[in-house]
């Protein structure tokens, strides 16, 4: 995903003289050369200053992209993003590599488990969580002329391609990947895992739909219509259950449906606690019960019994 993103920025820079890339402690992995070389900057370990610099460039008509770890691109830079960029309506593009548990081998300082909540809270900020490299390719050209600032969470590396070109891509529009009586709402690294879980459940006669909500803000209001058609909703995210995708969807549903019209809703995600264990993304997702077989088992129990089962980090509306 990250390489696809950097390749697209490089291509956009060649076609658009206003595109600028700023890296903090990691190079882009692609070559900026010729006229584009003057629009690539390496500014090591100065996260807050970089956002201020990018906001200044945006004020002059440039389109600045900032590549940094998701934790540092959100936690260390919050005030500058809010005041220098979003308050002043100077659009910047933040690329958060290693979102979720992707870089858990580096410890709790690098596990971005609350980044979506942080960025969602800022006015004039768009939050996008793509599911694979192909979707990144469809996303990036749309970021050129988007009017506000954008946070793009790169939640995984080298995973399966599950998005389809014919499904299209539009910022703010969720994609229904499959239909079913049980609707799984998810995004990012969890989308392909949700698809795998749905395939396991299909073999047991439980038909699950998948709604890939790549844009958490602005949230697609049509999610309400999808929810009205199903018997149960499962929300899955590689994020704490505080302030992320599930919270955004619950807010939308409560604001737009009568309580009696809302089907049973269950949320699978990370607990409201720092991740203290080291490991890779898969091992920690296993620990938190978020791998496909674990998801399928939980949903299967819910669908068959029609009542909550004992499962870690699940909330019911």
Image: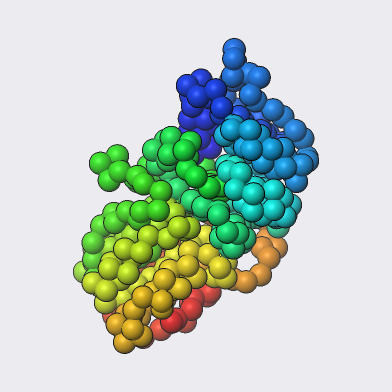
Q: How many marks?
A: 0
List the single residue furthest toward the top: 34
Who is closer to the viewer here, 86 or 313? 86
Give the residue drawn at x 62%, y 37%: 58
Kindly identify the residue that appears in the image at 32 percent across and 69 percent down: 224
Quarter where residue 21 is shown: top right
Which residue: 69% across, 53% down? Answer: 83
Asked if 52 appears above or below 217 in the picture, the reply is above
For residue 178, say whether it is visible. yes
Displayed quadrant of residue 228: bottom left
Residue 300 at x, y percent in the picture: 33, 73
Given residues 133 and 141, the one toward you in this image is 141
Is residue 218 placed above or below 154 in the rendered structure?
Answer: below
The spot of residue 292 in percent (x, y) is: 41, 60
Comparing 254 with 1, the one in front is 254
Give x and y (percent) for residue 67: 63, 38
Q: Quadrant for residue 207, please give it.
A: bottom left
Residue 153 visible in rendering: no
Q: Toward the viewer: 236 or 6?
A: 6
């Amino acid at each position: 995903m990250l390489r696809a993103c950097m390749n697209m920025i490089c291509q956009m820079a060649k076609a658009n003289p206003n595109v600028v890339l700023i890296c903090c402690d990691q190079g882009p992995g692609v070559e900026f050369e010729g006229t584009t070389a003057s629009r690539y900057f390496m500014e090591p370990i100065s996260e807050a200053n970089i956002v201020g610099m990018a906001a200044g460039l945006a004020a002059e008509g440039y389109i600045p992209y900032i590549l940094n770890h998701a934790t540092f691109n959100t936690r260390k830079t919050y005030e500058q993003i809010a005041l220098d960029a979003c308050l002043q309506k100077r659009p910047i593009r933040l690329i958060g590599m290693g979102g979720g548990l992707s870089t858990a081998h580096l410890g709790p300082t690098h596990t971005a488990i609350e980044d979506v909540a942080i960025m969602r809270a800022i006015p004039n900020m768009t939050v996008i969580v793509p599911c694979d490299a192909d979707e990144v390719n469809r996303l990036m050209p749309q970021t050129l002329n988007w009017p506000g600032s954008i946070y793009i969470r790169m939640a995984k590396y080298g995973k399966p391609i599950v998005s389809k070109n014919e499904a299209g891509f539009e910022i703010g529009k969720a994609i229904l990947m499959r239909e079913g009586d049980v609707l799984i709402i998810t995004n990012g690294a969890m989308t392909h895992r949700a698809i795998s879980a749905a395939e396991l459940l299909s073999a047991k006669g439980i038909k699950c739909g998948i709604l890939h909500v790549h844009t958490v803000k602005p949230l697609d209001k049509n999610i309400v219509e999808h929810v009205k058609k199903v018997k149960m909703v499962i929300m899955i995210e590689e994020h704490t259950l505080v302030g992320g995708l599930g919270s955004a969807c619950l807010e939308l549903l409560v604001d737009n449906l009568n309580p009696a019209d809302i089907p049973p809703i269950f949320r699978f995600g990370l607990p409201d606690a720092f991740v203290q264990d080291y490991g890779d993304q898969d091992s920690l997702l296993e620990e938190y019960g978020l791998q496909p077989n674990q998801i399928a088992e939980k949903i299967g129990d819910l669908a068959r019994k029609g009542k909550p089962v004992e499962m870690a980090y699940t909330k019911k509306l």
